[in-house]
Amino acid sequence: MTVLVTGGAGYIGGHMALALVDAGEKPIVVDNLSTGFAWAVPAGAQLVVGDFGDADLIAGAIQTHGIDTIAHFAAKLVVPESVADPLGYYLNNTCKARNLIETAVKGGVRRFIFSSTAAVYGEATAEPVAEDRAPNPVSPYGRSKLMVEWMLADADRAYGLRSVVLRYFNVAGADPKGRLGQSTLNATHLVKRAVETALGRHKSMDVFGLDYPTHDGSGVRDYIQVTDLIDAHMAGLAHLRAGGASLTCNCGYGRGYSVLEVVDVVKKVSGVDFPVNLVGRRAGDPASIVAKADRVRAELGWRPQHDDLTRIVSQALDWERRRHNRRS
């Protein structure tokens, strides 16, 4: 049994490739290296450089390597960018995913794990947000992901393609062994940007919006450590291999931190009181969203091991230092 990992040279997909190799498997990574890095693909995984929407490339990989499962991570994921370039997001995240799903079905792939997002929920009118909450995305990014969820549900009914859809909340941190972390250039993730600023990569950082209806006016998010997130993927893979039905699960801890609280933790962990610019809201950002994550525990037996914001920030800071040394 072989797993094809799209986007497996990137941050989250790279951690999936690591987990598969750690489990004794030999995944095939497909990545166009537009934001990923060849060095991020672990020894024991094979890198195929190309686009996940290239049907001939994917069909060839399925046939050559006997792929029976696809774990799909490759996507554009910056909410404000999706507002400015919605058609680009629908092309990359939705249309190419449709090609990938069709190629999987034609190639006899029976299992599919999809990297979705809490952005499908939109503004949370009540928290925590459970999976049975009706989706109402407020950005093209969230809509582009929701449409893939719909396609997978239809592909299950029509063709028997079983899937586990994991709706991520905010992913942060790094591999506890120091092998991989967030390395994307100009990444906009809050923890990533804050630790870069603490290390002097930027003169200051922006906080977008202080007029949200939250306890301190800044946006509130549920931050999940990347290795815990990948453990949920591995549990999803085991579920599907055991003949489990298609499933949609939130991936979060069920507790939110505001942007200002996260920045404060980064300052304390790094020991650097870096400048913060308070600016207006970004288009497409909800005020607050926190996961109700009971289903992933009950259905997949997932138990987080790294639910500690200080530790998550420390991992990100350590990785950023390693990344700097790697380039020097």
Image: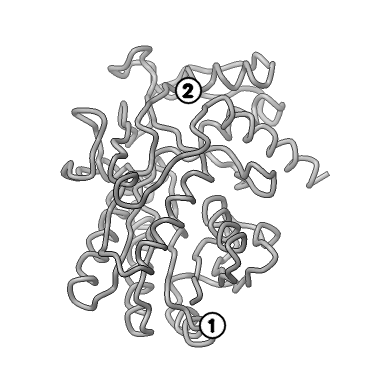
Residue position for label 1: 65
At label 2, counting other C-alpha atoms closer than 10 Å, the crowd grade (few under 14, some 14-19, many 20 or more) is: some
Q: Nearer the viewer, residue 146 or 113?
A: 113
Looking at the image, residue 109 sits to the left or right of residue 24; the answer is left
**Quadrant location of the C terminus?**
top right
What amino acid is labelled 1 in the image? His
At label 1, counting other C-alpha atoms closer than 10 Å, the crowd grade (few under 14, some 14-19, many 20 or more) is: some
The relative height of residue 167 versus residue 46 in the rendered view (above or below) is above
Quadrant in the rendering for residue 177 = top right
Residue position for label 2: 207
Q: Position of residue 216 (x, y in %)?
A: 38, 12
Q: Nearer the viewer, residue 253 or 187?
A: 253
Q: Position of residue 42 (x, y in %)?
A: 67, 61
Residue located 35% across and 68% down the image: 242
Quadrant in the rendering for residue 103 = bottom left
Q: Position of residue 228 (x, y in %)?
A: 49, 44
Residue located 54% across and 69% down the image: 30
Residue located 61% across and 16% down the image: 275
What amino acid is labelled 2 in the image? Val
Q: CA distance from mark 1 to mark 2?
A: 46 Å
Label 1: state its secondary structure. Answer: helix
Looking at the image, residue 319 sits to the left or right of residue 102; the answer is right
Label 2: state its secondary structure. Answer: strand
The relative height of residue 260 versus residue 306 in the rendered view (above or below) is above
Residue located 52% across and 44% down the image: 226
Q: Position of residue 267 (x, y in %)?
A: 62, 18
